[in-house]
Amino acid sequence: MNRRFVHDLERGGGRPVGGADEAGRGCLAGPLVAAAVCFEYRGWSDGDYELLERLDDSKKLTRRARAALYGRVISRARQVAVVACAAQSIDRRGLQACNIGALETALGLLSPPPETVFVDGYALSDNAVPHERLVGGDGLSAAVAAASIVAKVTRDRLMAALHGRWPQWGFERHVGYASPEHRRAIVEHGLCELHRRSFASVAYRQLELRADL
């Protein structure tokens, strides 16, 4: 059995296990997306585990593999919740506050809350669902790995849809990350509504852009 399931089963004792992760934290444009997934392992068959045997950190998977696993997660999970923070919210509240808030909100949407909850890398506030910070959680917990995939696929699909409104920046390909193509588009076209202006002090200055873009 995949070691990620073993971790969940050993810690959860067969009871429902929740996991949360985010996608888009390091992007220049687009939302930050957090997802929470709850698996109820009690009663699963060998076939259920086999369906999700390839779960992993979403960044280590191809787009096609993520899409296939996304469908399997959705069909097998007890609950899935997704929360997005727009660029304007990130600029106003700050990236870390949005990240923590989105993870907390996504977990809060799992009802009833799982007794065992893992969050990839971050300790949330005292008001959050009781949880355990799990560094490298998408490599240890199937629920966290599933949340990583749901967040990534959801965000990528959203950016592909938004490409139709802002085609000059090529969002359907780089989905807002600071790729060479994206940097060239920013130099040529400036910033659009999807860009996070609060990143200007780091990312955009490196591109030698004017402060008034």
Image (cartoon, rainbow, N blue to C red):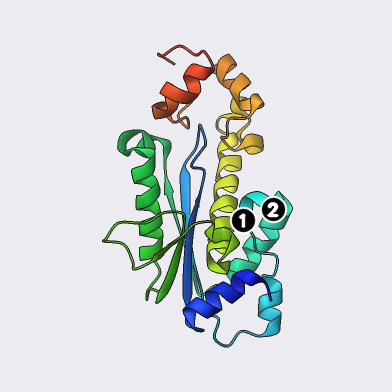
* Distance Cα–Cα, label 1 vs label 2: 7 Å
* CB contact under 8 Å: marks 1 and 2: yes
Name which quarter of the figure residue 45 lies in: bottom right
Residue at the disc numbered 2 = 61
Residue at the disc numbered 1 = 57
**What residue type is disc 2 on?**
Leu
Please report the residue visible at 37 percent of the width from the left and 43 percent of the height from the top: 96
Name which quarter of the figure residue 139 lies in: bottom right
Disc 2 secondary structure class: loop
Q: Is residue 115 left or right of residue 29?
A: left
Disc 1 secondary structure class: loop
Classify mark 2: residues with Cα within 10 Å, few (<14), some (14-19) or many (20+). some
Q: Is residue 200 left or right of residue 146?
A: left
Q: Is residue 53 left or right of residue 8?
A: right
Please report the residue visible at 59 percent of the width from the left and 57 percent of the height from the top: 149
| Residue 197: x %, y % from top left | 41, 26
Q: Which mark is residue 41?
A: none
Q: Is residue 32 above or below residue 147?
A: above
| Residue 137 appearing in the image | yes
Please report the residue visible at 48 percent of the width from the left and 74 percent of the height from the top: 17
Name which quarter of the figure residue 189 lies in: top right
| Residue 191 appearing in the image | no
In this view, the residue in front, 38 or 13, is 13
